[in-house]
Image: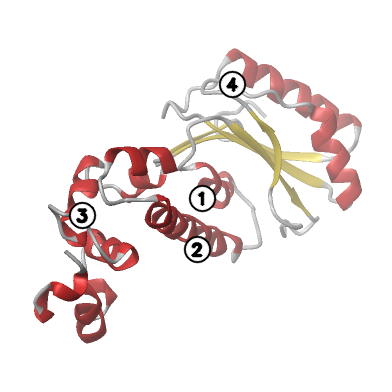
């Protein structure tokens, strides 16, 4: 059934125009994007089933692949699935813009808020370096240093410091995520922090912190007295 075949008071587009977007459920908003369902379900019913399979979580939805959507949900072809994934990506970028509006990083919590939008929806480890001027204003965007697997990623301190020299920034911070949800540092994390700290000392660059990021928490080497 096409959305236009629904009663007027059940059509998501009309409800959005009359009541505003906040009045609609995530399933109804997604139904607007795909326009129609399948022979057994309206667009709203199809999206309600999809959201139920995601436990009602938009974060879980954003982690689904194009194949997940097109294979498991009748009525979701590549074009509709791409629309859903594009909407999820726009949401991530909106969060990143909000984080980037704060251009000064003076503590671990502020560093965490800057990095979280970059890593909260990925299932592998990524490491980012943040470069700051002497007044702690951020120079450019966080730089992706490395991508890894589910449990580890390799970081070369030389790459971190090379970029600091290029950007002419006297302060650097490092951050990486743990997809497992655990903030406990590994032995490799400890070794990396030690080597990076030593390299920064030689180059007269301040290592502001190294944090491990999860969705909802973080571990700070500075706050734990290890830097």
Can residue 117 be seen in the rendering of this structure?
A: yes
Q: Residue at x 51, y 50 (%)?
A: 117
The mark that comes first in sequence, 4 or 3, is: 3
- Secondary structure under the numbered disc 3 in the rendered image: loop
Disc 2/disc 1 C-alpha distance (Å)? 9 Å
Which image quarter is the N terminus in? bottom left
According to the image, label 4 marks what residue? 152
Can residue 210 be seen in the rendering of this structure?
A: no
Numbered badge on residue 117: 1
Q: Is residue 216 above or below residue 136?
A: above
According to the image, label 3 marks what residue? 38
Measured as percent of width and height from the top left, residue 160 is found at 79, 36
Measured as percent of width and height from the top left, residue 176 is found at 59, 34
Around disc 3, counting alpha carbons within 10 Å, would you say few (fewer than 14), some (14 to 19), or many (20 or more)?
Answer: some
Measured as percent of width and height from the top left, residue 167 is found at 86, 52
Q: Residue at x 62, y 26 (%)?
A: 148
The mark that comes first in sequence, 4 or 1, is: 1
Q: Which mark's residue is nearer the viewer, 1 or 3?
A: 3
Return the residue found at the far front: 39
Around disc 2, counting alpha carbons within 10 Å, would you say few (fewer than 14), some (14 to 19), or many (20 or more)?
Answer: few
- Secondary structure under the numbered disc 4 in the rendered image: loop
Q: Residue at x 79, y 40 (%)?
A: 206
- Secondary structure under the numbered disc 1 in the rendered image: helix
21 relative position to 140: left or right = left
The mark that comes first in sequence, 3 or 2, is: 3
Disc 4/disc 3 C-alpha distance (Å)? 42 Å
Around disc 1, counting alpha carbons within 10 Å, would you say few (fewer than 14), some (14 to 19), or many (20 or more)?
Answer: some
Q: Is residue 222 above or below residue 198?
A: below
């Amino acid at each position: 059934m096409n959305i236009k075949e629904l009663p007027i008071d059940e059509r998501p587009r009309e409800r959005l125009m009359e009541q505003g977007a906040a009045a609609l459920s995530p399933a109804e908003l997604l139904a607007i994007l795909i326009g129609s369902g399948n022979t057994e379900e309206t667009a709203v019913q199809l999206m309600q089933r999809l959201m139920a399979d995601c436990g009602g979580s938009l974060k879980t939805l954003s982690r689904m692949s194009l194949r997940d959507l097109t294979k498991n949900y009748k009525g979701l072809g590549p074009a509709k699935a791409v629309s859903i994934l594009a909407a999820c990506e726009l949401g991530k970028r909106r969060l990143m813009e909000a984080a980037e509006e704060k251009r000064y990083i003076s503590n671990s919590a502020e560093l965490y808020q800057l990095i979280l939008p970059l890593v909260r929806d990925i299932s592998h480890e990524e490491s980012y370096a943040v470069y700051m001027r002497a007044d702690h204003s951020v120079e450019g965007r966080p730089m992706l240093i490395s991508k890894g697997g589910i449990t580890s990623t390799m970081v070369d301190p030389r790459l971190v410091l090379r970029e600091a020299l290029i950007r002419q920034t006297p302060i650097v911070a490092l951050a990486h995520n743990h997809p497992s949800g655990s903030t406990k540092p590994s032995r490799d994390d400890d070794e990396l922090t030690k080597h990076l700290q030593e390299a920064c000392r030689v180059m007269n660059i301040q290592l502001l912190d190294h944090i491990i990021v999860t969705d909802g928490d973080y571990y700070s080497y500075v706050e734990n007295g290890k830097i």
